[in-house]
Amino acid sequence: MSAQTLQPQVVDTDKLVDRKLVLYFYLASLTFLFVSMLGGFLMALQLIRHNPFSGIELFSPGRWRMIHTNAVAYGFLANGLLGSMFWAVPRLTLRPVLSSHLSWFIFIAWQAVVLATAGGILFGQAQGLEWGETPTWIDPVALLGLALVVVNFLPPILMTPGPLYVTLWYFMAALVWTFLTYAMGNFMPEYFVTGSAAGAVGGLFIHDLVGLFVTPIGWGLMYYFVPILLKKPIWSHGLSLVGFWGLAFFYPLQGIHHFLYTPIPMFLQYGAVISTIAVELVVATVIINFFGTLRGSGSAFITNLPIRWFYTGMVFYFLTCLQCAFQTTLTFQAIIHFTDWVVGHAHLVMFGVFGLWIQGVMTYLMPRLLGHEWYSRKLCEWHFWLSSISLFAMAVDLIAGGLVQGTVWRALLPWEVSIDASMPFWVVRVFTGIGMFAGQIVFYVNIYRTWQLGLRPAPAAAPTSTELPAVVAAT
Ligand code: HEM
C-alpha cells in the first residue's frame, strides 16, 4: 500500500454542504409553522366562540385544524429535519448527497406537495385519516417524493466504511421506515382493509409517523449536535445502540394504544400497551445517555443557547414519557380518552420536544447560514423563554382540562356541562398560543436582522464551520 493511501484524507466538509439549500429548508419550515399557528388560533378561537370568520366555509375551523396538523408535521417538522440532514449527512459521511439537482428538486417538490395538500383540504378534498388527509391524487406523488429522498441520502451513508456513527443508523432507518409508513397509512385503509382493521392501520400510521420518522431523525440530530457543542463524545455508545434497536423493535407495535376500548381485538390492544411500556424504557436509556453526556458540563445549559433548547426538549421528553406511562393503561384511558389531555400530550411532544430541538439546531446553524452572528442575543433569549414557557403552560392547561372533561363525562352529566367546564382552559390556551406565536415573531425578526447584517461586508471573517463555535455556540 502506498504511503499516500495511508494518509488520513482531509476533506473540506464546508464544501460538501449546500448552505443555501439548508437555509431554504429552514425558511420553509418556519413559514409553515407560522401558517400552522394561525390555523391553531382559528380553531382555539372557535372553541371559545370567538371565530372571526364564522360562516365562511373556506375558514371553517374543521378544515383549518387539518391545515394546522398537516403544516406542523409535513411543513414545519419535516422541512426542519430534512434541512438539518442536508447539513449533517455530508459532514458525517465526508461525502455529498447523491445529487445537488435532485436535492433542489426535492425541496421544491416537497413544498408543492404540502401546499397542494393544504389547498386540497381547504377545498374539501381531505381524506378521513388523521395526518393522511392528503387528497387521494397526491398520495402517489408524495410517496414518489419520499423515494427520491431515500435515493438522495442513502448513497453517501452506504458508501461510508463502518462502523457507522449512531446518527447515521438513525437516519438510514428513518428514510426506509418513513417510506414504508407512508405507503402503509395512505394506501392500505384506502384500498385493502376496511372497518376496525382500517382503524388499526390508521393508529399505526399516525404513531409510526412520529416514532419512525420524526423520532429517529430527531434523536440522530441530537447524537450529532450535542457532542459537537459540548466538545466531548457521547456518554455511552452502547446505550445509544440500545436506544436504536429498542426503537426499531418496539415502536411499530404501539400505535393501537390510540384505540383502546374500540372493537379492535383485545390481544392487539394489550400488545400495544406492553410495547408502549417497552418504548418508555427505551426512551429512558436515550435520556440517561444525554444527561450522562451533560455531566460535568452543566453550565452549558445556561450559557450555550442551542444546548439549552436541546436539554429543555429532553426534560419535556421525560415529562411526556411520564405522562405516557399513565395514559397507556386501560384504567387511565377510561378517563382521558378523547379529552384535551391527549391534545396537551401532542403539543408537549411535537413542539416541546421535536419543535424545540429543531429550533435549537436553527439557533446554532442560522448564523452559519446567514454569514453573521445573531443580531441580538437578547432576542434569542426572548425566543427561547416565550416558546418554552408558553408551550409548557399550554400543555399543563390542556392536560388539566382533559382531566376535568373526563371526570364530568364519567359522572354522566349533560354534555354542555363539560363544555362550560372546559371554557376556562380553552381561554388559557388562546393566551399561551399568543405567547408561542410571539416567540416565533421574535425569532423571525432576529433572523431578518441577522440576514441584513450578513449582507454587509464583514470586518472580520464570519464563522463558517461547526468546528468554530467559539462565539456563536457560546450564544
Ligand atoms: C399558536 C399556537 C397553537 C395553538 C393556539 C394551537 C391550538 C390547537 C388546537 C385548537 C388544536 C385542536 C384541538 C382539538 O381538536 O380539540 C390543536 C391540535 C394539535 N396541535 Fe396545535 N396549536 C398551536 C401550536 C402547535 C404547534 C407549534 C404544534 C407542533 C409543533 C402543534 C401540534 C398540534 C397537534 C399534533 C394537534 C393534534 C392533537 C390531537 O389530535 O390530539 N400545535 N392545536
Image: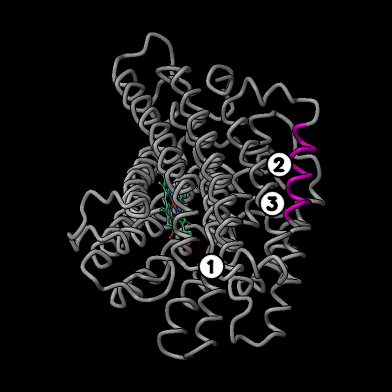
Q: Which residue is mark 3?
A: 166
- Left or right for 232, reference 466: right
Work out whether residue 349 can be spotted: no
Q: Nearer the viewer, residue 468 or 117?
A: 117
Name the element at disc 3.
helix
Q: CA distance from mark 2 to mark 3?
A: 26 Å
Place of residue 141 in the rendered image (x, y in percent of width and height, measured from the top left): 33, 71
Residue 189: percent from the left, percent from the top?
Answer: 45, 84
**Mark 3: which amino acid?**
Val
The answer to whether residue 413 is seen in the rendering is yes
**Mark 2 to mark 1 CA distance (whole Å):** 77 Å
Q: CA distance from mark 1 to mark 3?
A: 52 Å
Judge from the rendering whether residue 231 lies leftward or rightward of residue 185; answer left or right. Answer: right
**Which residue carries the number 2 mark?**
6
Q: Residue at x 24, y 64 (%)?
A: 122
Q: Nearer the viewer, mark 2 or mark 1?
A: 1
Label 1, on which residue?
A: 413
Disc nearest the viewer among 2 and 3:
3
Residue at 80% x, 38% y is 292
Prevailing SS of the magenta stretch: helix
Residue 153 bears which disc, if any? none
Q: Earlier in the sequence, mark 2 or mark 1?
A: 2
Range drawn in magenta: 283-294
Q: Nearer the viewer, mark 1 or mark 3?
A: 1
